[in-house]
Amino acid sequence: MKSFFGKVKLKYTIGILALSAAVIALIWWQFISLKPYQISQTEIQDIYQRHAGYTPEILFEEIKPGQYTISFTSYDGDKVEGRLELPEEVSLEQWLSEHNTGANEIFLGVSAMGRNYLRWWQDSFQGRPTITQVNKIGEMALASNNILVAIDARYHGTRKSETLPLSKIMNNLNLWGKRSDYENMVMGTIMDYKHLISALEATFGKADITLAGYSMGAQVSLILGATDKRINKILAIVPPNVDNKVAKVAPINFITMLDERRVWLLTANGDDYADNSENLNLFANINSSNKKHLSFNSGHILPEGYTDKLLPWFENEAQ
């Protein structure tokens, strides 16, 4: 008899726990989880053309001939740090004296979430390998006579915040339905790159600008390319599928504005952050006839040597 009542009590307890879990899940979904919203073209213009006239003073500090740390103050007073490397081991002054303004090619790298700007130069950082292989892309850019430039995204690298680390930003987004920290991080990074371009043009004159990014960097690159006509070419590598729960930073809301820019999209058929149908939809909606889609049999981290497929990009072969 005790065994019978014990089993009934156990089933009753399990039932109560299951019901409680279901109620908590329902409350979370109804009142906490993010819901999609719409953003208009007017709102997009207002957000991404704000502070458009701001040109910061960029400071160069030589590391070695042809390579400099750079820094500037963004529109909201935030300090931005990064690196610039010339294709030749010469001083900036010599380069500027030998190259007419308006004839420079600038390659801007945008790192993946959690990665700092040095990844575009180094095959490892603090003992951790650069699994995105963007250092190889940086080498290819320099070999193709591009000036290579990258800065840290907000809350990354030199801009980490003890009060708002990336883990808290993502937990706020995914667990607590707070999108503002994540959206502001991405939007602020996009604005920083806009001001970086203005500062570089003040130094080098109008330039042929390429924008390349991996993961979150690809997300930034697609939005920045769509909202800044100074960018001519975009190399977007495994952008995550970001939907209208964060509409202000969802590439799908911007790619119809790319207006015949040269765009290569690299995706993976086993990507946990964007499935095949989402990737195909993203590519289909890129408003350019000068576009190419490369798909890899891998996860979000593309296979070793994927950068070899980018040789035609740097060789300027036909699409």
Image (spheres, rainbow, N blue to C red):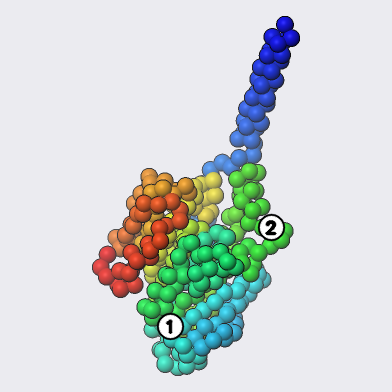
Q: Nearer the viewer, mark 2 or mark 1?
A: 1
- Residue extending farthest left: 318
**Where's the N terminus, which quadrant?**
top right
**How many marks on residues?**
2
Task: Answer left or right for 61 relative to 96.
Answer: right
Q: Is residue 71 above or below residue 179?
A: below
Q: Residue 215's x, y, as percent?
A: 48, 58
Task: Answer left or right for 309 relative to 252.
Answer: left
The residue lying at 54 percent from left, 86 percent from top is: 64
User: Could you say which quadrant of the image residue 317 lies in?
Assistant: bottom left
Q: Is residue 178 above or below residue 121?
A: above
* Circles 2, 1 touching at the beta carbon (< 8 Å): no
- Residue extending farthest right: 2
Q: Amino acid at mark 1?
A: Pro
Which numbered dot is residue 164? Answer: 2
The residue lying at 38 percent from left, 79 percent from top is: 143
Choose between 121 and 128: the one closer to the eye.
128
Q: Is residue 80 above or below residue 64?
A: above
**Where's the C terminus, which quadrant?**
bottom left
For marks 2 and 1, the one nearer the N-term is 1
What secondary structure is found at the residue carrying circle 2?
Answer: loop
Which numbered dot is residue 87? Answer: 1
Can residue 77 be seen? Answer: yes
- Crowdedness of circle 1 by 10 Å Cα count: few (<14), some, many (20+)? some
The residue lying at 39 percent from left, 54 percent from top is: 267
Q: Residue 14's x, y, as percent?
A: 66, 21
Give the spatial CA distance, label 2 vs label 1: 37 Å
Q: Amino acid at mark 2?
A: Leu
Q: Residue 7's x, y, as percent?
A: 68, 14
Q: Residue 192's x, y, as percent?
A: 56, 69
Q: Is residue 248 above or below residue 68?
A: above
What secondary structure is found at the residue carrying circle 1?
Answer: loop
